[in-house]
Image (tube, grey):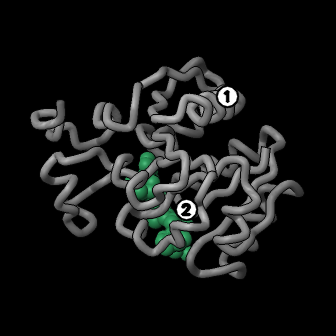
Amino acid sequence: MKVSIIGPGGIGGVVATLAARRGHDVILTNSRGAATLEDQVRTLGPNAREASLVEAVQAADIVVLAIPLTALSRLPAKDFDGRIIIDMMNYYPMRESQIAVLDDGEMTSAEMVQRELPGAHVIKALNNQDAPHLLLNAGTGSALPVAGDDAEAKESVAAFLRDLGYETIDAGMLRDSWRMEPSNARKLVMP
Ligand SMILES: NC(=O)c1ccc[n+]([C@@H]2O[C@H](COP(=O)([O-])OP(=O)(O)OC[C@H]3O[C@@H](n4cnc5c(N)ncnc54)[C@H](OP(=O)(O)O)[C@@H]3O)[C@@H](O)[C@H]2O)c1
């Protein structure tokens, strides 16, 4: 598979490592540009390269979104039309600015991502392990929840995660993905 990582930082970098290990073509992109990714690309090996954000999105079978949630509005939404997106972002209001629709429990963060990228197939996954454990737990029998509204895209992501070394658990629709979010205070108001 061609897997593009938007934001190969702490956690996106782990997904890049796991995907490269399994022989996937890995494309890295960030906001600071190619020069800042050279070392990481070299470390990942011959199946890795960097690209502009739009090229990375267009080339990918699966796009992994691993940027701060507050950077979401800076993405070129139209370019994501038709793409399968793994949303591994978490909302940490104490670290980032407040987002009213999330604070009010109007929607899950994954539903907000889907609202911002309306033409994409957004799947919530890979957000509930920290970076060291995501690396360590691969291949140990650990399971990850996967939520999404598009059954076909959800199965594609589940197959990708199984290939990386994880069992998967169907966590329902995007509206159900509050169960996978770090801030479970919202469950008091979500249906
Ligand atoms: N770290 C964890 O253990 C962990 C676990 C689960 C989920 N998460 C979630 O994953 C996301 C990333 O967390 P992190 O800890 O990996 O953060 P991080 O180490 O700061 O990495 C963030 C990455 O996003 C890139 N980025 C930021 N704005 C961008 C933009 N507008 N366009 C393209 N790339 C952009 C950064 O590159 P530049 O510096 O070049 O912009 C960097 O590669 C967050 O939503 C977090 O809640 C993290």
Q: Is residue 10 left or right of residue 46?
A: left
- Estimate the x, y position of residue 75 in percent, counting from the top left: 50, 71
Q: Is residue 129 left or right of residue 31?
A: left
Q: Is mark 2 within 8 Å of ligand 1?
A: yes
Give the spatial CA distance, label 2 vs label 1: 24 Å
Q: What amino acid type is highlighted by mark number 2?
A: Gly
Placement of 24 over or under 144, stated as above or below: below
Q: Residue at x 76, y 59 (%)?
A: 59
Image quarter (top left, top right, bottom left or bottom right) of the C terminus: top left
- Estimate the x, y position of residue 87 in percent, counting from the top left: 48, 48
Quadrant position of residue 81 = bottom right
Rate crowding at label 1 as few (under 14), some (14 to 19) or many (20 or more) other CA atoms within 10 Å: some
Residue identifier under label 2: 9
Image quarter (top left, top right, bottom left or bottom right) of the N terminus: top right
Q: Residue at x 61, y 66 (%)?
A: 79
Nearer to the camera, 29 or 137: 29
Residue identifier under label 1: 159
Q: What amino acid type is highlighted by mark number 1?
A: Ala
